[in-house]
Amino acid sequence: AMAKDCGATMVMIGNSEVRQYLGLTVADSKKQVEAAAAQGLNILFCVGENLEERNAGQSETVIYDQLAGLQGTDLTNIILIVCYEPVWAAGTGLTPTVNQANQMCALIQPWIRNNISDEVASKTKVIYGGSVSESTVNSFVNQDNIIGVYGSGVSQNGTTFAGLINTATRS
């Protein structure tokens, strides 16, 4: 209620840093989703696997386990955006290819359709939350399974961020 009272219309749940450093669990994220939806707050829900999980071939399992935080709550009256964060790339010098990002994002809506509902899946927007720049943004947003990007690093510089926004075009 406090976030809504302050004028918030959307909350972020499941951010990789919160999972990693504060130990956010699926049960915790489920409680946060329930509370946000009950207040009518829209949700930006983050999922992503680390390098160890990726190298062990556990990417899909990790994403599906994290998405379980959305189950059990009525999400039909809010906007749900799911952001795939390639945690494995952060600080490693590795960068996901557009195809890798698209493949991971392709897992999300079918899971929601199969585990929540067709209605919620059809309204859910899936975005990519890895490294993007003016020169790469269009290659990401024009994939079949990626509707937009969450560029946290690029947003720290107003000029660069404005350039990214002005460049991004979904065809």
Image (spheres, helix red, strand yellow):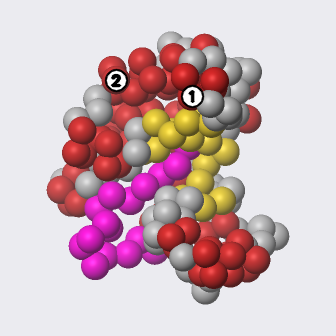
For the record, the magenta segment spans 82-99
- Location of the C terminus by quadrant is bottom right
Q: Residue 78: x, y in percent?
A: 70, 27
Report the residue that reaches farthest toward the bottom: 135
In the drawing, does residue 40 fall left or right of residue 52? right
In the drawing, does residue 99 fall left or right of residue 64? right
Q: Is residue 77 visible?
A: yes
Q: Is residue 54 visible?
A: no
Q: Is residue 73 above or below residue 67?
A: above
- N-term-proximal mark, 2 vs 1: 1
Report the residue that reaches farthest toward the right: 171
Residues at discs 2 and 1 in contact (Cβ within 8 Å): no
Q: Which label is found at residue 3?
A: 1
Q: Which label is found at residue 25?
A: none
Q: Quadrant of residue 159?
A: bottom right
- Give the camera-side residue of 125 and 112: 125
Reply yes or no: does residue 96 show up in magenta.
yes
Disc 1 residue type (three-letter): Ala
Q: Residue 60: x, y in percent?
A: 37, 45
| Residue bearing the label numbered 2 | 28
- Location of the N terminus by quadrant is top right
Disc 2 residue type (three-letter): Asp
Q: Is residue 104 above or below residue 10?
A: below
The mark total stands at 2
Which residue: 22% across, 45% down?
Answer: 21
Mark 1 packing: few (<14 Cα in 10 Å), some, or many (20+)?
few
Per the model, the C-alpha gap separating discs 2 and 1 is 17 Å
Which residue: 45% across, 23% down?
Answer: 32
Foreground tag (2 vs 1): 1
Which residue: 40% across, 45% down?
Answer: 15
